[in-house]
Image: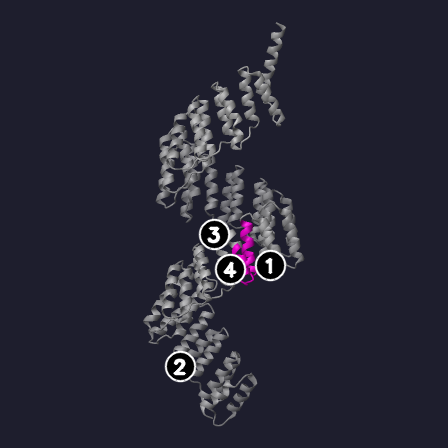
């Protein structure tokens, strides 16, 4: 039978029986048909995806004296690769070479594809380049196979994945040198690689090249670019590209919708995310469970629990079966809002809907009860979890260890560690660090050191958190030399000190009056590329102020602002209060002025501290100026501010002005409270304005406020004096 006729005959096969019947007929013929005809038949069976059968038939051919050629060997290699037995494919290649058959690009590309399918990407790449070195010209299939393999590296680490993406980009540029034209598939792969490498702009350059060559981007192309933009927090651009995609008639798939939704949620655009979900509905695209999970999680994390619960109700109404992810998000959100009872109810509902709680569900509930201080309830949930056959993990045990330690019940926490060991779960660095911290807080530092030694013996190296706990403990004991030694040990063990380590050490030095030494530590930090944060600056400024080095503290404030670190206003208030309490009003004003000049927006509390200092120093006019400056700067005085100024005016004998200010408090939405009434009443009594004082006392009591002891004493004195004068 001619080959062409056989080819047509094989093309008519729609079932295996016909193919096998023909094979049996051919194998029994004498003389037998050529290997070409057998190969055509084998290829037809390959198209039916009966790979193991083809391998068996190939072996039967050899036994019956039919010799393979390069084409039939390639068919067998392809079958072994499809069966996940690429090493057998290489054995066939070895047999080919031994028999003098030269493999072609298809043979080698088949093996490369087999290696990639088994996640043996490095071997695939090596074979690809070896093929080129031996003079084979790669085709688009070979190149795309390697590109695909590099982009689907399985469960490899991030560093390996990044290396593979970079290698794919390099290969993509070499394809043109080899005369291999890109197709839409290879362009999509390159765009994905650039996006994964954080170079989305290069991805858009590839898109431009695609369009120039006449390739129309598909939903995969645009979804990949949208994902790349979202990963770089360019969510607005991603949303714009999404809109453009729809305008051009390219219907987005669930990947594109979910990518934009996820991007909006990740960047905190909760409102836009909700609108986007609604838009999905309007455009006839029903959001899937993943979309709802993403948005519910976002709402919960942003404290919008009621909105999350409403969305959950919508899921149920639409007949979408909630999954474990949605339940866990809601339970976590409820626990974070202190609604443990509601969370437990949802857990029961979840079980009723045949959704089994997992370890994360239970860990969320156990953690919530522990943080609330209801440890016995947490233990009860822990026991229920075990009864359900869910084995606690190291996180579960760490939650309980931490809870007992926070209650200062170290023996109970050690019991938990003993239990976890019995269950075959070894403590990790978090477990040990928690125990070290608990012992240090109880002043049992030597026992904490023993725990660190135990860690090392068990092959668990302390991390920066563990070392920071020890450094802090030594500093609190004023054992500065031990703290220095611990930092040196950290470095020897390959653990670099972080900003927290240095802040602990700087704080200890400043408390011991060693501010110059603390400044040297800051220089050391910078040399090690560790930028000081606002805690560092605050500690130094407090230390400098304690030593009276106000101008240096002001200079440090300027440096802090230049470096982009904005001091917290509580720190500012503490520093100003410290100056005023020590009678260093000039320094307080200098520091206050330095902050204003720096452009830092001060709050009412910062002003109040300085106003109080001025009033106590008798500088009422300057205090009044600062008080009026509040409204100029868009700030409103609070009750504390009014009380300070009213008291200051009264002490200076300016009762009419004080009373006028007292009566205008309501204009600033700040109604007088007990302390304000008492200040005015006491001032009136001291200046013998009895009727005014009595009138205010009646008003104060009517509003539910009580007279202070000083106010009551002044009234008693007044009554006694009145009786005395009557007697006389």
The quadrant holding residue 564 is: top left
Location of residue 540 (image quadrant): top left
Towards the viewer: 95 or 252: 252
In x, y percent, where is residue 284?
A: 55, 63
Residue at 53%, 91% (x, y): give it. 25
N-terminal of the pair, mark 4 or mark 1, is 4
**Residue matched to label 1:** 323
Q: Residue furthest right?
A: 352
Q: Residue furthest bottom?
A: 30
**Part of the protein shown in magenta:** 275-301
The extreme left residue here reads 177
Q: Hey, which quadrant is residue 693 in on the image?
A: top right
Which of discs 4 and 1 lies nearer the camera? The answer is: 4
Q: Is residue 291 magenta?
A: yes
Residue bearing mark 3 = 267
Front of the two marks 1 and 2: 1
Task: Tell me which label, 1 or 2, sits earlier in the chain.
Answer: 2
Task: Measure how far apart labels 3 and 4 are at the Cα level.
Answer: 14 Å
- Label 3, label 2: how many angstroms apart (C-alpha)? 61 Å
Label 2: which residue?
98
Residue that mark 4 sits on:
258
- In this rendering, the answer to whether 83 lies above or below 408 is below
Confirm or deny contact between disc 1 and disc 3 (CB under 8 A): no
Q: Earlier in the sequence, mark 3 or mark 2?
A: 2
Count the labels in the image.
4
SS assignment for the magenta stretch, majority: helix
Q: Secondary structure at mark 4?
A: helix
- Tag 2 near tag 4, CB within 8 Å: no
């Amino acid at each position: 039978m001619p080959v062409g006729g056989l080819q047509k005959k094989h093309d008519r096969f729609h079932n295996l029986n016909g193919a096998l019947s023909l094979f049996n007929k051919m194998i029994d013929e004498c003389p037998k048909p050529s290997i070409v005809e057998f190969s055509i038949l084998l290829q037809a069976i390959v198209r039916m995806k009966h790979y193991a059968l083809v391998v068996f038939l190939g072996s039967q051919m050899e036994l019956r004296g039919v010799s393979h050629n390069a084409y039939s060997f390639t068919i067998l290699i392809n079958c072994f690769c499809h069966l996940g037995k690429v090493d057998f494919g290489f054995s066939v290649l070895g047999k080919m070479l031994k028999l003098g058959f030269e493999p072609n690009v298809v043979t080698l590309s088949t093996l490369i594809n087999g290696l990639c399918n088994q996640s043996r990407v490095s071997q695939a790449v090596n074979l690809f380049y070896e093929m080129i070195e031996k003079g084979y010209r790669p085709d688009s299939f070979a190149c795309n196979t390697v590109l695909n393999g590099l982009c689907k590296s399985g469960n490899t680490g991030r560093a390996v994945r990044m290396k593979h993406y970079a290698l794919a980009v390099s290969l993509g540029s070499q394809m043109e040198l080899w005369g291999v034209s890109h197709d839409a598939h290879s362009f999509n792969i390159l765009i994905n690689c650039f996006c994964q490498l954080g170079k989305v702009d290069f991805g858009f350059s590839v898109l431009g090249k695609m369009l120039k060559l006449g390739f129309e981007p598909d939903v995969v192309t645009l979804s990949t670019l949208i994902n790349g933009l979202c990963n770089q927090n360019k969510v607005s651009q991603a949303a714009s590209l999404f809109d453009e995609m729809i305008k051009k008639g390219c219907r987005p798939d669930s990947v594109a919708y979910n990518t934009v939704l996820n991007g909006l949620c990740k960047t905190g655009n909760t409102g836009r995310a909700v609108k986007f979900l609604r838009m999905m509905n309007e455009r006839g695209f029903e959001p899937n469970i993943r979309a709802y999970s993403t948005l519910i999680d976002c709402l919960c994390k942003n404290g919008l629990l009621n909105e999350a619960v409403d969305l959950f109700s919508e899921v149920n109404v639409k007949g979408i079966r909630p999954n474990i992810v949605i339940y866990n998000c809601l339970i976590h959100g409820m626990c974070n809002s202190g609604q443990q009872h509601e969370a437990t109810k949802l857990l029961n509902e979840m079980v009723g809907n045949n959704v089994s709680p997992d370890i994360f569900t239970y860990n969320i509930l156990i953690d919530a009860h522990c943080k609330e201080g209801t440890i016995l309830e947490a233990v009860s949930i822990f026991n229920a979890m075990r009864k359900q056959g869910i084995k606690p993990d190291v996180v579960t045990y760490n939650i309980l260890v931490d809870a007992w330690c926070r209650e200062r019940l170290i023996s109970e926490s050690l019991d938990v560690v003993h239990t976890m060991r019995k269950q075959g779960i070894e403590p990790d660095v978090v477990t040990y660090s928690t125990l070290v911290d608990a012992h240090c807080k109880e002043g049992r530092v030597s026992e904490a050191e023993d725990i660190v030694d135990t860690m090392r013996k068990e092959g668990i190296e302390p991390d920066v958190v563990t070392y920071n706990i020890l450094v802090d403990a030594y500093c609190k004991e004023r054992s500065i030399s031990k703290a220095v030694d611990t930092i040196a040990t950290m470095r020897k063990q390959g653990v670099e000190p972080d900003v927290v380590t240095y802040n602990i050490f700087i704080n200890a030095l400043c408390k011991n009056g060693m501010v110059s030494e603390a400044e040297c530590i800051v220089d050391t930090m910078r040399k090690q590329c560790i930028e000081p944060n606002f805690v560092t600056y605050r500690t130094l400024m407090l230390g400098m102020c304690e030593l009276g080095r106000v101008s240096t503290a002001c200079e440090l404030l300027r440096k802090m602002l230049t470096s982009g670190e904005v001091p917290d206003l509580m720190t500012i208030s503490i520093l100003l209060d410290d100056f005023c309490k020590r009678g260093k009003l000039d320094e307080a004003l200098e520091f206050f002025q330095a902050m204003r000049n720096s452009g830092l927006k001060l709050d009412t509390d910062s002003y109040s501290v300085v106003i109080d200092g001025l009033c106590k120093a008798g500088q009422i006019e300057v205090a009044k100026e600062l008080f009026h400056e509040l409204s100029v700067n868009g700030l409103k005085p609070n009750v504390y501010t009014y009380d300070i100024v009213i008291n200051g005016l009264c002490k200076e004998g300016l009762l009419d002005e004080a009373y006028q200010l007292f009566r205008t408090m309501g204009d600033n939405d700040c109604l007088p409270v007990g302390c304000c009434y008492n200040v005015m009443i006491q001032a009136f009594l001291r200046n013998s304005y009895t009727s005014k004082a009595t009138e205010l006392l009646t008003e104060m009591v009517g509003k539910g406020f009580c007279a202070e002891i000083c106010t009551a004493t002044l009234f008693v004195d007044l009554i006694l004096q009145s009786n005395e004068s009557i007697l006389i």
